[in-house]
Amino acid sequence: AQSVTQPDIHITVSEGASLELRCNYSYGATPYLFWYVQSPGQGLQLLLKYFSGDTLVQGIKGFEAEFKRSQSSFNLRKPSVHWSDAAEYFCAVGVAGYSTLTFGKGTMLLVSP
Amino acid sequence: GAVVSQHPSWVICKSGTSVKIECRSLDFQATTMFWYRQFPKQSLMLMATSNEGSKATYEQGVEKDKFLINHASLTLSTLTVTSAHPEDSSFYICSALGLAGGTILEQYFGPGTRLTVT
């Protein structure tokens, strides 16, 4: 069965600083990988996804993620964080052909002034 | 495109009553929908997979008699929490499986429903 690990429960970043959120997955085949963001009391918003092709994926709101098969990782990055980026971020892995998603436990991003 | 709505967005009910949550795909048809539950400050846990015209498939540990799922049309799935108790209070999120113009099926998420049982 697939699994997702987000090793950081909380991360605090200064506004304007760069951000990297870590995500490692376990899955026997080529995974579909996703990053979602959730603001308090809200649903999930898809930031970006990787299905195949270029391993560096661009998403919305200036986010990008890089799929590294050798490290089983799909880390999320942003060069300059804005206060509005403060939210919970979830990494998820999907099983090809059925799109069953397994979510990581999430990383709460706090942005300091 | 690929908009999924949920109704209501929040509901308060008394212990012992039942409450129904609707999940609709607004601009695409979804033969498969998913229901998740999210406890405060935790991740999403899949409760069940709902297939149009057939019985839902429940994840291990989810009481099918307590969480009734109906997927009667290609755009609507409902989750009914029967005889609700305070421990059922949670954030319930649905998603719908669709192509939405692409070639790979993806899950599109609703905004969630906050259930509080008093």
Image (cartoon, coloured by chain):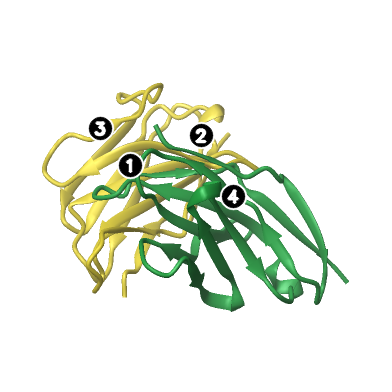
User: Disc 3 marks which amino acid?
Assistant: Thr
Q: Which of labels 1 and 4 is toward the front? A: 4
- Cα separation, mark 4 vs mark 3, equals 28 Å
The answer to whether tags 1 and 3 share a subunit is: yes
- Cα separation, mark 2 vs mark 1, equals 17 Å
Residue B46 percent location from the top left of the image: 41, 38
Q: Which of labels 2 and 1 is toward the front? A: 1
User: Disc 1 marks which amino acid?
Assistant: Leu
- Cα separation, mark 2 vs mark 3, equals 28 Å
User: Does residue B62 lie above or below B96 as drawn?
Assistant: above
Q: Which of labels 4 and 3 is toward the front? A: 4
Disc 3 designates what residue? B57
Instruction: State which chain disc 2 sits on.
Output: B
Rendered green, the chain in question is: A
Q: Is residue A43 visible?
A: no
Determine contact: label 4, label 3, CB under 8 Å: no
Q: Specify the label residue B14 is tagged with.
A: 2
Determine contact: label 2, label 1, CB under 8 Å: no
Q: Is residue A51 visible?
A: yes
- Cα separation, mark 1 vs mark 3, equals 13 Å
Q: Specify the label residue B79 is tagged with.
A: 1
Circle nearer the N terminus (1, 3): 3
Q: Specify the label residue A23 is tagged with.
A: 4
Say how many tags the image has: 4
Element type where label 4 sits in the image? loop
Instruction: State which chain disc 1 sits on.
Output: B
